Amino acid sequence: MIDYRNVSVFIQKQSILRNLSFHIPAGQFVGLIGPNGSGKSTLLRTMSGWIPRTEGRISLAGKALERYKRRDIARLISFVPQDTSVDFDFTVRDIVMMGRHPYMSRFKEATREDSLAAERAMYITEIAHLADRTATSLSGGQRQMAFIAKALAQTPQLLLLDEPISALDIRHQLQTLELVQQLTYDGLTAVAALHDLNLAARYCDQLILLHQGQILSIGTPEEVLTPTSIQKAYEVHIELRQDPWLGSLSITAIGIEEPSLKG
């Protein structure tokens, strides 16, 4: 689905991402992990085409990203930002219908196909009963689902999510990640920036661990979430075990790594 070859990004002459190379197959749920400032959000935005790469090559579905028209990218890729606040009293249906803009002609009304795509997205995200509610009246979890529904109304092949569960309670965290996981079972490719390592290990097929703008480790959760890698990236000591109920890795932070003393 997406392929990076020696990609670097400089913003205002500052190195943000350095020499990234990886491949994400279709139908995978990939988690981007790493400490604050490691480059997760920037990497997502290079995938969407919002931030251009300075060096290297990015391919989407076998074609160089820069060869796509903006409207074509919007039909292939949908993006759910970290901040889903809304300043106007749009209804949930209005927000979800915004996901159909890449398919709608200017100054023309939505087609039946557009309406059906929006209704299906609201049904999948279990917010159809909120369709006529204003966004400002929703809880954080409900608003997050409305923006995920908007992204799904685009009928994308690649779904990008920037810390989609950081402001949610545990129920909505599980609901969001279970939904994304199910969508990848149905063929969608998803990439999400995540902070919770236990949930990343539980739901993601692959993880990319970023550290100071570089890939420190990439692979399955078992391959990436090692004491050595976590200590280097996060400067904490951890204990790993296999959760007997879930069958996934469980990570417990033991303590902060003490800085070395030079005498």
Image (cartoon, rainbow, N blue to C red):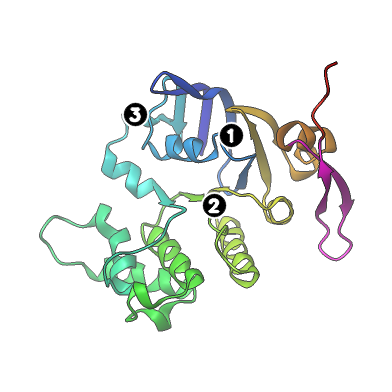
Residue 56 visible within the image: no
Residue at position x 71%, y 34% in the image: 233
Q: Which of the 4 quarters of the picture holds residue 112?
A: bottom left
User: In the drawing, what numbered circle is on residue 38?
Assistant: 1
Residue at position x 36%, y 37% in the image: 50
Label pair 1/3, CB-CB below 8 angstroms: no
- Mark nearer the N terminus (2 vs 3): 3
User: In the drawing, what numbered circle is on residue 103?
Assistant: none
Quadrant the C terminus occupies: top right
Please report the bounds of the magenta region as a residue range.
235-257
Nearest the viewer among 138 and 103 is 138
Nearest the viewer among 85 and 206 is 85
Is 62 contained in the magenta span? no
Is 237 contained in the magenta span? yes
User: In the drawing, what numbered circle is on residue 66?
Assistant: 3
246 lies above or below 9: below
Majority secondary structure of magenta residues:
strand
Distance CA(mark 1)–CA(mark 3): 25 Å
